[in-house]
Amino acid sequence: MSTLAQVLAVTAGVLHVGVGVVEAFFFQRPWAQQFLLRKRSSPREVDLWAFNVAFYNVFLGLGTVLGVVLVARGLVDEGRTLVLYTAGFMTLGGIVLWISDHRLWTGTLGQSGFGLATLLATLAS
């Protein structure tokens, strides 16, 4: 994997972990809802959903970073495979987000932007 692919993968991973932390622990704060939903209120029923989705993002981000660690430790095929899977997951997850609600296009860019860039850079290297 190229250095560019590794930097993009770590960036995508850290971004997903960060968003996961916001979703899990700060979701009820107005600034977090504005950041995540583009509005400042949501029904209380959404809290459990947000907490669950948060950990999908955290695990996805950690998996991406783990892939880069594996590459750095000489397990190139294993690490590259993990990065390709997680980057593909991010990319497709962002597309599904946009299909479900076009107003969340900024979330789509955040979810899939670095994932797609990582995917392309990894495939090219």
Image (cartoon, rainbow, N blue to C red):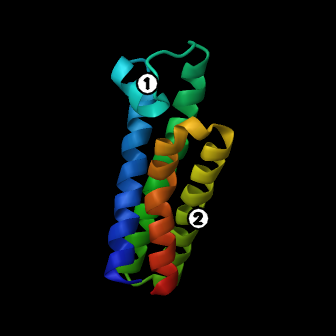
Give the residue at x 44% y 49%: 110
Residue 42 appears left or right of 2: right
Q: x, y (%) of residue 33?
A: 43, 24
The quarter of the picture where the C terminus appears is: bottom left
- The residue lying at 47 percent from left, 51 percent from top is 109
In front of the other: label 2 or label 1? 1
Residue linked to disc 2: 88
Please give the residue where the numbered disc 1 appears in the rendered image: 33
Q: Position of residue 35 (x, y in %)?
A: 39, 32
The image quadrant that residue 90 belongs to is bottom right
Q: Quadrant of residue 66?
A: bottom left
Q: Which quarter of the rendering shows the N terminus? A: bottom left
- Mark 2 or mark 1, which has the lower sequence index? 1
Q: Amino acid at mark 2?
A: Gly
Q: Nearer the viewer, residue 40 or 115?
A: 40
Residue 24 vs 89, above or below: the answer is: above
4 up-or-down from 98: above or below: below
Q: Is residue 59 above or below residue 33?
A: below
Residue 23 shows in this picture? yes
Q: CA distance from mark 2 to mark 1?
A: 26 Å
